[in-house]
Amino acid sequence: MLKFGVVTFPGSNCDEDMIYVLGTVLGQKVESLWHKDRDLKGCDFIVLPGGFSYGDYLRSGAIARFSPIMEEVVKHANKGGYVMGICNGFQILCEAGLVPGALLHNNTQKFICKNVHIKADNNNTLITSAVDTNKALKIPIAHGEGRYYADEATLKSIQDNGQVLFRYCDQNGNITEDSNPNGSILNIAGVTNAGKNVFGMMPHPERAADEHLNNTDGKFLFDSILSLARV
């Protein structure tokens, strides 16, 4: 069984949601990790949750990236340990250089909170291994700075290496301009690092993993993690 650690930063607001899904819904061991600590408490898989760390001053995630806990998270990732960042957590991963690219203001310049559809780009990563690449997953987003951007060389590299996790699509799985909620380049909704042990995505699978919410599409991602992870 994996032991998960969920980090809480000042301004995190999805940490308890993630702890609930991992611990109560999925029955996994979960530790709450504080941003000022330097102890990962023996966790195998670290999650950086959504929210507004440090009030999103400067760029989103720019201050959280320097939290004491992040020194240990970076070491963990560099040793091949699993790390996942969702929404604000994805922004922190980009700021820390743990995944390629950057997250810019939405092209509408507005905060967007709604259900969208995403499609797994491949089955070659831990988080997408058991996800049907032909299925459109309904997953909520809630962000003001979610527009994924990378330069041409980086885009070529991550596509050649199979590092794109998800792309925004319509309910039928078609990747279209209209189905892109924030202007992300190539409809990219999530990416992984070259080693494929660090995962970042803007949509919130933890908000779509409970039958009481009438949406369990996010559970496919967690089932993928639990079915293939080996420590």
Image: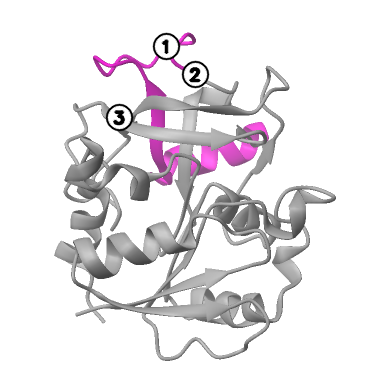
Task: Look at the numbered disc 2 and give the secondary structure of its residue.
Answer: loop
For disc 2, the neighbor class at 10 Å (few under 14, some 14 to 19, many from 20) is: many
Q: Which dot, 2 or 3, sits closer to the camera?
A: 3
The reply to whether the magenta stretch includes residue 157 is yes
Quadrant housing residue 213: top left
Look at the numbered disc 1 and give the secondary structure of its residue: loop
Q: Is residue 173 left or right of residue 17?
A: left
Please state the extent of the stretch shown in magenta in the rendering: 151-180
Name which of mark 2 and mark 3 comes first in the sequence: 3
- Measured in 3D between alpha carbons, the distance from the residue under mark 2 to the one under mark 3, in whole angstroms, is 13 Å
Question: Residue 142: x, y in percent?
Answer: 53, 36
Which residue carries the number 3 mark? 138
Query: For mark 2, what is the residue?
Result: 180
Name the disc covering residue 176, or none. Answer: 1
Residue shown at 30%/54% (left/top)? 127
Assess whether residue 150 is covered by the magenta stretch.
no
Image quadrant in which the C terminus is located: bottom left
Q: Are marks 1 and 2 in contact (CB under 8 Å)?
A: yes
Colouring: one colour
Residue at the image position 52 percent from the left and 20 percent from the top: 181
Alpha carbon distance from label 3 to label 1: 16 Å
Discs 3, 1 touching: Cβ within 8 Å: no
The answer to whether residue 73 is above or below residue 161 is below
Q: Is residue 64 left or right of residue 41?
A: right
What amino acid does circle 2 point to?
A: Asn
In the image, residue 97 lies at what x, y percent?
A: 66, 60
